[in-house]
Image (spheres, grey):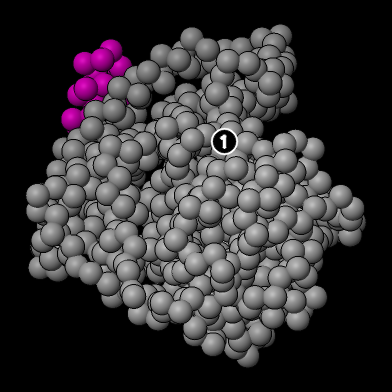
């Protein structure tokens, strides 16, 4: 074997080792969700005397869905005298301002905030909205979500626990009839929440605050000076800031909130790329702090590092694929390498919520998905699509870090499909 | 007042551990049987290859089993043909990047394969020969197929233990996929021989790297999806209440 082949083999071995770690992680999470007693949520702490609640809804050109989410909140059974809703019109140029004005005129507790200056983007919008509110319990919904009163009440209940700094609900796509992509994303989301988040919550690992269908204590975020507007993944960043300061993140698996997933490949590509870019920023900021944190035990540190590194998996596997191809072209391929790389490329190709096929399958059984699970093998055909989107996002993030470049917010376009 | 949300949030499938252990024992026995009778499987595949027009030649011992390769011929390509392949492959990558009417994920798969074809042609232009001689490629394929026969049952068997399949469902999944894969390997082997004979060595890499082991695993996942769909339907049917445990 020549030197080049030896180097390629060494790299391929590293890729395989890392992939094995992630495959085992997901197998452990799947088995823990399926076979182990679950940690209960805070249902029993629900109270008829609702603590006051602020709901923040960042919106940039959300005319297609603005009426729908506000109508949903208006029709909810949450006591309106204890509710403050702040929809943030963040530099919109469509019909969003008219929708907000109409609802504000009819409902006193809906208090729109208009932003026409400063940085556009969710973190900056949330920072301005937080200044307007004074309720400790703050929930966040993206504009395409459909929050119910029970959901808001349930998420808020987690803050009865003084150790909980943030709470996350379960996101469920409602536009699954919008095509193959939406159906695949539904399966992927199911695995990410029903298995991944719930298992990490039950195992006392690090469930994530996801930035929508979620909530946090206002005093914490306000006390830190708000979200960093240069960070695209402000949700992941908040998650790690909380854990690194000794706070907990609660996960409410029953608190299902319906969202619109991208139904176009272009929209999905841009969404994944943005997620990967933001995640890379957070990885660079927090990995060392996770290792030395006095608040996290060994398993939590391992979980935190694996979560921080998860968007590096697709580019890593892609380099493994390239290394394997070069070895083949050099006439020095080893069968085991091809077999293992193929196994990972096929088995681990849902790169949004990062679920291997067995995790998606188990989540589908828990959710009673039925025939939709027959789509499982199709995840492989998204392998290159997902890998490329994530790889470009990671590269974007690295360039941001190297050049200290402030990223621009590239929001996901909504179709406004009826639920 | 406490109100519980969707019940699916709090449920877990009831796993009968005695059935899990029994399944594990059966699957381990099947894997042992597979290693023991590997030679029979290899002979079955060779027989099918012969029936499909292939010419099995030579044998090589793998875990004590005699594994035959096919007598293949790789069509020679002169430097002009290789240059055309290299340019056409590279052009296809760019054209596919924005090809209308083809779904984006499929475009990326085609572009990846076009890139490999182009790279193969360039390597062949530089070296004057394909990555593998016909006999070496044939031997590589035959050994890969046998290794996958050994890996697939263990891979699917272990992953099926975590959900409440019945023991015979697990056995059916593993043996069904194995039988299918042995037959599929033989058919694909003959098809590869035919394609290499007509298109030459530039197709060797995409055939092996895209239509080789990845397809075996796609089939395995397809088999798993059939079983898991059946399970998902069963646990929401009339026996649903007995199928779950709560919190």
Residue pointed to by mark 1: A416
Q: Where residue A319 appears, x then y in whole percent? A: 63, 47
Which region is colored magenta? B43-58
Residue at the spot 46% in from the left edge and 69% down from the top edge: A153
Within 10 Å of disc 1 (Cα), the crowding (few <14, some 14-19, many 20+) is some
Residue A309 visible in the displayed image: no
Q: Position of residue B134 (x, y in %)?
A: 47, 24
From the top left corner, tell me how far across and down residue B193 is, in percent. 41, 18
Tell whether position A72 is magenta: no
The vertical placement of A264 against B221, above or below, is above
Judge by depth and name the residue closer to the eye, B208 or A108. A108
Nearer-the-camera pick, A94 or A340: A94
Which x, y percent locates residue A402?
86, 58
Residue A255 visible in the snapshot: yes
Q: Is residue B110 left or right of residue A222?
A: left
With respect to residue A371, does A42 lie above or below? below
Residue A171 is left or right of residue B186, and the answer is right
Residue furthest to the bottom in view is A294
Quarter where residue A108 is shown:
bottom right
Secondary structure, mark 1, is: loop
């Amino acid at each position: 074997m020549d030197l080049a082949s030896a180097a390629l083999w060494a790299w391929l071995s590293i890729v395989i080792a890392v992939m094995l770690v992630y495959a085992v992680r997901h197998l452990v999470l799947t088995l823990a969700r399926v076979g182990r007693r679950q940690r209960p949520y805070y249902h029993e702490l629900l109270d008829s005397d609702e603590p006051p609640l602020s709901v923040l809804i960042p919106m940039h050109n959300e005319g297609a869905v603005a009426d729908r989410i506000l109508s949903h909140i208006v029709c909810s059974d949450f006591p309106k005298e204890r509710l403050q809703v702040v929809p943030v019109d963040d530099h919109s140029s469509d019909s969003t301002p008219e929708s907000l004005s109409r609802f504000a005129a009819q409902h006193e507790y809906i208090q729109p905030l208009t932003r026409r200056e400063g940085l556009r983007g969710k973190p900056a919008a949330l920072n301005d909205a937080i200044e307007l509110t004074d309720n400790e319990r703050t929930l966040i919904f993206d504009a395409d979500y459909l929050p119910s009163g029970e959901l808001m009440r349930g998420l808020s209940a987690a803050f009865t626990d003084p150790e909980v700094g943030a709470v996350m609900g379960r996101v469920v796509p409602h536009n699954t009839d919008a095509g193959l992509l939406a159906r695949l994303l539904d399966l992927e989301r199911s695995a990410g929440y029903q298995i991944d988040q719930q298992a990490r919550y039950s195992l006392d690992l690090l469930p994530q605050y996801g930035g929508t269908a979620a909530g946090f204590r206002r005093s914490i975020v306000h006390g830190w000076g708000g979200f960093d507007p240069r960070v695209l993944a402000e949700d992941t960043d908040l998650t790690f800031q909380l854990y690194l300061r000794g706070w907990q993140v609660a996960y409410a698996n029953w608190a299902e909130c319906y969202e619109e997933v991208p139904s176009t490949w272009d929209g999905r590509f841009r969404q994944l790329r943005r997620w990967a870019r933001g995640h890379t920023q957070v990885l660079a900021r927090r990995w060392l702090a996770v290792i030395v944190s006095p608040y996290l035990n060994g398993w939590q540190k391992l979980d935190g590092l694996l979560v921080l590194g998860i968007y590096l998996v697709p580019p890593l596997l892609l380099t493994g694929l390239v290394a394997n191809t070069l070895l083949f072209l050099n006439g020095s391929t080893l069968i085991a390498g091809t077999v293992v790389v193929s196994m990972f490329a096929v088995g681990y190709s849902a790169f949004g919520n990062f679920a291997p096929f067995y995790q998606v399958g188990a989540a589908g059984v828990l959710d009673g998905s039925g025939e939709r699970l027959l789509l499982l093998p199709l995840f492989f055909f998204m392998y290159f699509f997902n890998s490329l989107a994530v790889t470009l996002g990671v590269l974007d993030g690295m360039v941001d870090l190297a050049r200290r470049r402030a990223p621009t917010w590239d929001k996901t376009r909504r179709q406004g499909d009826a639920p | 007042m406490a109100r519980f949300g969707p019940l699916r949030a709090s449920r877990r499938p009831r796993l009968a551990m005695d059935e899990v252990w029994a399944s594990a024992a059966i699957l381990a026995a099947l894997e042992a049987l597979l290693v023991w009778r590997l030679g029979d499987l290899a002979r079955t595949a060779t027989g099918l290859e012969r029936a499909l027009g292939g010419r099995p030649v030579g044998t090589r011992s793998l875990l004590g089993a005699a594994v035959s390769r096919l007598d293949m011929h790789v069509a020679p390509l002169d430097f002009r043909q290789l240059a055309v392949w290299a340019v056409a492959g590279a052009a296809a990558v760019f054209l596919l990047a924005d090809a209308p009417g083809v779904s984006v994920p499929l475009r990326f798969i085609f572009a990846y394969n076009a890139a490999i074809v182009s790279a193969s042609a360039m390597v062949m232009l530089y070296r004057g020969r394909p990555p593998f001689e016909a006999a070496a490629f044939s031997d590589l394929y035959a050994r890969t197929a046998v290794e996958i026969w050994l890996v697939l049952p263990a891979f699917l068997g272990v992953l099926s233990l975590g959900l409440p399949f019945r023991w015979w469902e697990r056995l059916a999944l593993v043996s069904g996929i194995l039988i299918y894969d042995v037959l599929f390997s033989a058919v694909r082997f003959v098809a590869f021989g035919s394609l290499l004979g007509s298109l030459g060595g530039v197709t060797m890499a995409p055939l092996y790297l895209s239509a080789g082991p990845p397809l075996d695993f796609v089939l395995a996942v397809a088999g798993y999806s059939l079983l898991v769909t059946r399970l998902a339907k069963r646990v929401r049917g009339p026996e649903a209440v007995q199928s779950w445990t709560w919190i």
